[in-house]
Amino acid sequence: MTWPASPAWLLELEATFGQMLRTPLSRSTLTLRAETNAYPEALLAQAKPSRGVDPAERLAVYNRQYWFRLFTLLQGAFPLTAQLVGFWRFNELASDFLVARPPRSWDIDRVGDGFADFLSTALPEADLELAPPRSSLPRAALLEAVRIDTAYRDVFGAPAVTPFTPALDDAARLLSGTLRLSPAVALLTESWPLCELRRRVVGHALDESLRLGSRLEAPRSWLLGRDGLKLGLAALEPREAQLIELLTRHTVGTALTHLEADCSEAERQRLPEQVQTWLARSVRLGIWVGLEVES
Amino acid sequence: MRSAHYRELFESWPALDYLEIISENFLGHAAPPRHHLDRVKERYPLVLHGVGLNILGPEPPDPSYLDRVAWLADYVNAPFVSDHLCWTGAHGHSHHDLLPTPYVPELVELVAERAAYVQRHLGRPFGLENLSSYVEFEQSTLSEWEFYAGVVERAGCHFMLDVNNIYVSSQNHGFSPAEYLEAIDFSRVLQVHIAGHAREPNGTIVDTHDQPVSDAVWQLYRSAMGRAPRPTLLEWDDRIPPLTEVLAELAKAKEYAT
């Protein structure tokens, strides 16, 4: 038994219907309105008027549903970003993203994949102008916010994993091995107090008075992890964060060499003891899932 | 089963005959959904309802998708699996909506063969749900119920009959919901869905699942249950009220079914 092919006329109908669905909603009247005059003529000719409602209006139900479903989904997946820019501006960013990268997977949770990368390339190199009562938002803060939202989404959706617990004989191969970071963990760096803002806004209605706050004197790093079903943040010292980031890209030995090279003489004095502490803490927090050694 | 109700569900474990899960919510490898599923499947029988099969789409389903649905059905020991008589994407795009086609004999044959394929792949009864639709096509030569009943009969699969959807489409397109019910062979109905809908300013009724079941749908449900009582599922997917309110609405089904 096989999967029979669709007739050509159905393929054509579904192509024009899809084109209609993806027609962006107009923002010109400060509401999101279906642009029915942009629908494909071939589709309009096939849709029947019904009960006094013309075909374009009926098709517009699907057009609006397509966009509002995806806007709502992305607002939920990127709550910090949506709150910072407001839903009106967020929907505009989401619309640009979805036009460029329309959903391709049956898994609706994949719709937001690539949103952070899209914004980092699509947004002009300028502050983001926002609708009143908001003013503007630094581009870097927006990109940081969307990366933090992405990390929360990815960590929450990660599979169950068994944390790596080093055995005695791992000690001999530790320096030449590469630690594998758990998918249920993310390293976050912020230049504004975004993690705290996110904690305040998640699950709440849009807060028009929400403000970004002042830029931090120095970037701050956090470890985002999942413990059971709960997500939690652990504050990291700057060199500790750097070590973890290096460990995700290098063998332990190479990571330590890079870290030492970046340290001042005073820091180097304390580094051996601190590295021991940081590594022990990372294992205790369960952020690694394995040690890979090239044979 | 909606995540908005997890807390109340896990605190009170209300007496329910069964729960329905959206298959796609549990096909991935994420740990939290699996954790919740494991808790629930110990307490209630579960049936699977999909939204991603795309049985009228141009491309065959990803084999890994069907394999995962079959795995999930085994995992929760689902007595049956259902999805929709519609298309949800085409030409590489996924629209995440339940979309209509013209109703013509050529497609009856096509979908019936596909539905039979799915049922065989899943190794358990497979039900197709009728749509709420907002547009009809000039090309149609069959009524919706002729199309639906024809597919189920030829495929040897089953009806997953949504009474609210019959009502919504009947109001949008001007047909008799009673005539629709007449065409259904109730011995092949696996399950009945009921839900709330909303009316747009231009009169179009939209299947929103965001409010109580309307009186008109309850009356149609009574008529359906008069033909043969079937397991009933209340869908409430948006503006979800507390579980107690949903259960109170569901309790009405028992009154209308008798």
Image: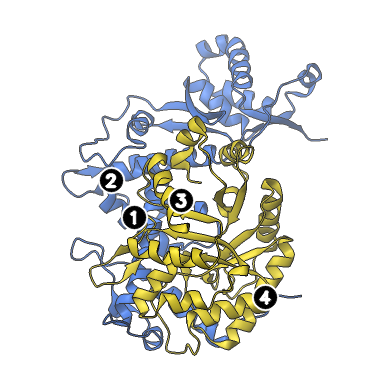
Specify whether residue B49 is in view: yes
Residue A157 location in percent, x, y?
A: 55, 41
Residue A14 location in percent, x, y?
A: 49, 78
- State whether residue A204 is above or below residue B70: above
Amino acid bearing label 1: Leu
Residue B164 location in percent, x, y?
A: 42, 64
Q: CA distance from mark 1 to mark 2?
A: 10 Å
Q: Nearer the viewer, mark 3 or mark 1?
A: 1
Pointer 1 residue: A93
Outermost residue on the right side: it is A295
Pointer 2 residue: A85
Secondary structure of residue under mark 1: helix
Discs 1, 2 touching: Cβ within 8 Å: yes
Pointer 3 residue: A117
Q: CA distance from mark 2 to mark 3?
A: 18 Å
Amino acid bearing label 3: Asp
Secondary structure of residue under mark 4: helix
Amino acid bearing label 2: Val
Left or right for B246, reference B191: left
Query: Which chain, by letter, is yellow?
Result: B
Q: CA distance from mark 3 to mark 1?
A: 13 Å
Give the crowd class for mark 2: few <14, some 14-19, many >=20 residues within 10 Å: many
* Chain on which label 2 sits: A
Query: Which chain, by letter, is blue?
Result: A
Pointer 4 residue: B155
